Amino acid sequence: MKQLADGLHQLSLFPPNAINVYLAGDVLIDAATRHSARGIMRQLDGREVTAHALTHAHPDHQGSSHEICLKLGLPYWVGEGDVKAAESGDMVTPQPDHPMPRMSQRALAGPGHPVDRVLHEGDDVAGFTVLEVPGHSLGHLAFWREADRVLIIGDVLFNVNPSTFWPGQLNEPRPFFTPDPARNRDSARRVAKLEPALVCFGHGPPLRDTKKFTDFVAGLPGA
């Protein structure tokens, strides 16, 4: 587990930075795939964890959520627009009609799990403010800490090439995983205006280059 900022750690999963899980204070944010539970829980052993929150209900972020919540007795926190998918485990229906979401569901998804807290704009999660940033999913959330300008962005943007998984390349998420790409770009523009000093992605290494981030967003279509 690597410390990225005060009270924020990135868990070590394989391959590094491919699918990211974070510990913000005592809240686990995202849970990778259903194959990741053992590695996640091993790294949490001995640490105080009181809740589990999702950036969004896609199979590579909720895969181990049910098992971790069950075994560690954690309440499950999800954005309003993703509650149905998170509880049912059906993450195909809200996504575009394409083979890739169906393949992802079969290969990576875990069972649904009851949501204990519905997160909304402005809620506090371990000192981070919840931002509603839909587009990649109906209820996609980001987590923003203004004091040191740290942003956990989920999959609003990637910092990896989504085809080759070569790190350090800013990209939009694939349209076949994104019900509303235009709205997702609006969400990217919203968080870029915050000028984050550290951006923590669902996929790809953390980024500490504010200008690189804001310049990329400024070049997105529809600006």
Image: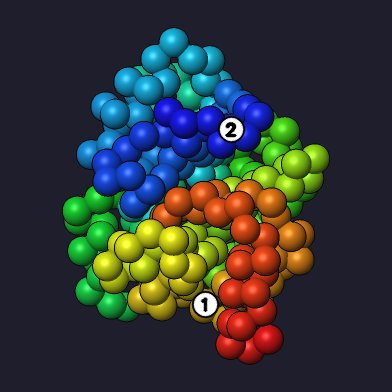
Closer to the camera in the image, 77 or 193 = 193
As drawn, the residue found furthest toward the right would be 147
Give residue 50's quadrant in the image: top right
Amino acid type at circle 1 is Asp
Alpha carbons under labels 1 and 2: distance apart:
30 Å
Residue beneath the point at 44% across and 10% down: 46
Ranked by sequence position, the earlier of labels 1 and 2 is 2
Look at 49% across and 15% down and name the residue there: 47
The quadrant of the picture occupied by the N terminus is top left
Q: Quadrant of residue 72?
A: top left
- Counting from the top left corner in percent of width and height, residue 65 is at 39, 37
**Horizontal and vertical percent for residue 191?**
69, 62
| Circle 1 or circle 2, nearest the eye | 2
Where is 97 relative to 170, above or below? below
Q: Secondary structure at mark 2?
A: strand
Pointer 2: residues within 10 angstroms few (<14), some, or many (20+)?
some
Which numbered marker is on residue 8? 2
Secondary-structure class at tag 1 = loop
